[in-house]
Image (tube, grey):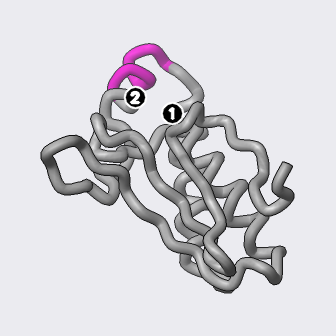
Amino acid sequence: MNDLLPPLVSDGQIQAEINGCLGLITLNRPQALNALSLAMIRDLTTLLNHWAARPEIQAVAVLGAGREGKPPAFCAGGDIRFFHQAAHAGDPALGDFFTEEYRLNHLIHAYPK
């Protein structure tokens, strides 16, 4: 296993690869305009933290997957359907989403690469 690619939990919603010294992340929910799920936020955080500590990775690029016949959408933000369903169900994962998403925003803001 490549030690530059940690295990991911989002079932392919985040794809990661290494191209030389570049870490490439692709948001892979084109049918939802690459809106972020909680699992995607967790994978992004895992990848960025892992690569921040690896001198082999000098930069990271994030891309959005496209839909056939349409230009790619980078990211539509958070998954509105999840917000609606979680709020109506009283699902505590809704709070986790915002806590972890804002933590990820800060990580990206202060990212050393």
Location of residue 52 in the rendering, given as x and y in whole percent from the top left corner = 75, 75
- The answer to whether residue 109 is above or below residue 77 is below
> Residue at 65% across / 66% down in the picture?
18
Report the disc number at residue 94.
1
Residue 87 colored in magenta in the image: yes
Tell me whether the residue at label 2 lies in contact with that at label 1, contact meaning CB atoms closer than 8 angstroms. Answer: yes
Q: Which residue is more in the foreground, 33 or 16?
A: 16
Q: Earlier in the sequence, mark 2 or mark 1?
A: 2
Q: Which mark is residue 17?
A: none
Indicate whether residue 52 is drawn in magenta.
no
Q: Is residue 99 left or right of residue 55?
A: left
- In space, the residues marked 2 and 1 are separated at their CA atoms by 8 Å
In this orientation, which residue lies closer to the viewer: 27 or 101?
A: 27
Which element is circle 1 on?
helix
**Extreme-front residue of the structure:** 20
Q: Which residues are magenta?
A: 84-90
Q: Is residue 2 left or right of residue 86?
A: right
In this figure, which residue is indicated by the disc labeled 2? 82
Q: Position of residue 55 (x, y in %)?
A: 82, 83
The residue positioned 72% from the left and 78% from the top of the image is 57
**Prevailing SS of the magenta stretch:** helix
Q: Position of residue 16 (x, y in %)?
A: 60, 55
Residue found 64% across the figure and 48% down from its top = 43
**Vertical comparison of 11 with 103: above or below:** above
Residue 51 placed where, x, y %? 74, 69
Residue 95 lies in what quarter of the image?
top right
| Residue 63: quadrant of the picture | bottom left
Q: Is residue 40 left or right of residue 3?
A: left
